[in-house]
Image (spheres, helix red, strand yellow):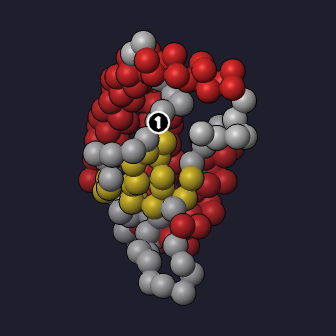
Amino acid sequence: MDRHTAALEQDALTSFLADGSYERHVRRIRRKNGARRAALLDALSKTLGGSVTVAGADAGLHVVIWLNHVPRKREAELRARADAAGIGIYPISPLYDPNLDRPDRVGLVMGYAALDERSIADGVRRLSVIIRELEASGSRQRGRVSPAP
């Protein structure tokens, strides 16, 4: 039906669909991504607990987390520290219309589909150290000391 897609690729896709290979592939990937999502949510809960609010955990290949105690003005610092530690983070702020109100805390889009469960847990653990440091320095700036994790 498509004049722009080569016939060979169309035939391969037809075979993939007809013999059930595509359906098996989708089921296998759903299981793997379900395990990865569970690993991410478990790591967030165990390492950051009430320091984060998780949104959108039931769909897609990512979740959004809001850092409850890190103000939006410290987003660039968080990103720089994460980059220096070799942790890829994706702030949610570019997804907001700058003319609209948005939360006054850092939000991150956390993808998990390209990582294995061990890498997810390690990345969240390493990120949690940076987040705790930012929370502690913010508390000191306000004249309070955060409780030890």
Relative to 133, residue 144 above or below: below
Q: For residue 53, what is the image quadrant?
A: bottom left
The N terminus appears in which quarter of the rendering? top right
Image point (64%, 41%), residue name = 2
Q: Is residue 49 above or below residue 24?
A: below
Q: Quadrant of residue 78?
A: bottom right
User: Residue at the spot x=28%, y=45% of the render?
Assistant: 58
Give the mark count: 1
Element type at marker 1? Answer: loop
Specify the quadrant of the image occupied by residue 51: bottom left
Instruction: Report the residue at 62% width, 60% height from top.
Output: 77
Looking at the picture, how far across and down is residue 97, in whole percent? 54, 78
Of 99 and 48, the residue lying toward us: 99
- Residue most extreme to the bottom: 99
- Residue 140 visible in rendering: no
Q: Name the residue beneath numbered marker 1.
A: 112
At label 1, counting other C-alpha atoms closer than 10 Å, the crowd grade (few under 14, some 14-19, many 20 or more) is many
Residue 80 position within the rendered picture, expressed as x and y whole percent measured from the top left: 66, 54
Residue 68: x, y in percent? 35, 63
Q: Position of residue 45 (x, y in %)?
A: 28, 41
Direction from residue 53 to residue 12 in the image, left or right: right
Residue 124 shows in this picture: yes
Q: Quick one: 45 or 24, which is closer to the camera?
A: 24
Identify the residue shown where x is 54% and y is 87%: 99
Q: Quadrant of the C terminus?
A: top left
Q: Is residue 67 above or below residue 30?
A: below
Amino acid tagged 1: Tyr
